[in-house]
Amino acid sequence: MKYFLEKYRVTFLFLVLLLTGTTTLQAQVTFRASAPNGVVKGEQFRLSYTLNQEGKDLRLPDLKGFDVLFGPSTSRSFSQSTVNGKTTSESSVTYTYILVAPEEGTFTIEPAAITVNGSSYRSN
């Protein structure tokens, strides 16, 4: 057993460092909302939330002043590229709602929240 540990110690340490480094290279979570800056009374518009990782428990803000016509529609995208032997990949999940503003006025859509790996994140 002692011989085995001495013989493979360097290999074992290399693997531990490699795996530790891999977990620290995970992408930073981004959670973004997008909607038009202005809409006409009665006009339908799209409110989308895009997350660059898998999440759960999407919590919408109070959409007081808007009628929700549709949603959420969930779409996923994935891209992978290799440049000079280095492979990078990106994925995202988009939650889309169709809303309408039945009345005139100035409205603000507050941030939504979502949980990723046990941590809560808020959109812009």
Image (tube, rainbow, N blue to C red):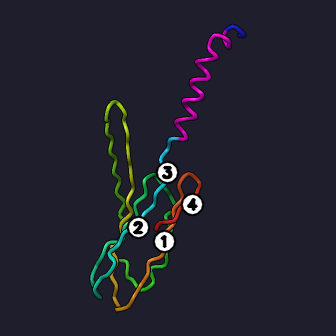
Res 89 quadrant in image: top left
**Residue 34 lies in the magenta-colored region:** no
Residue drawn at 54 percent across, 39 percent down: 23
Callout 2, which amino acid? Answer: Ala
Q: CA distance from mark 2 to mark 4?
A: 15 Å
Identify residue for label 2: 33
Q: CA distance from mark 4 to mark 1?
A: 12 Å
**Which residue lies under the disc numbered 4?**
120
For the residues labelled 4 and 3, say whether their Cβ atoms are less than 8 Å apart.
Answer: no
Residue 52 percent location from the top left of the image: 42, 53
The residue beneath circle 3 is 28
Question: Real-space Cα distance between discs 1 and 2?
Answer: 8 Å
Furthest-bottom residue in this view: 104
Give the quarter of the figure containing the N terminus.
Answer: top right
Type of the residue with mark 1: Pro
Q: Earlier in the sequence, mark 4 or mark 1?
A: 1
Label 4 neighbour load within 10 Å: few <14, some 14-19, many 20+: few
Residue designated by label 1: 111
Give, as a three-letter code, the residue at label 3: Gln
Of callouts 4 and 3, the N-terminal one: 3
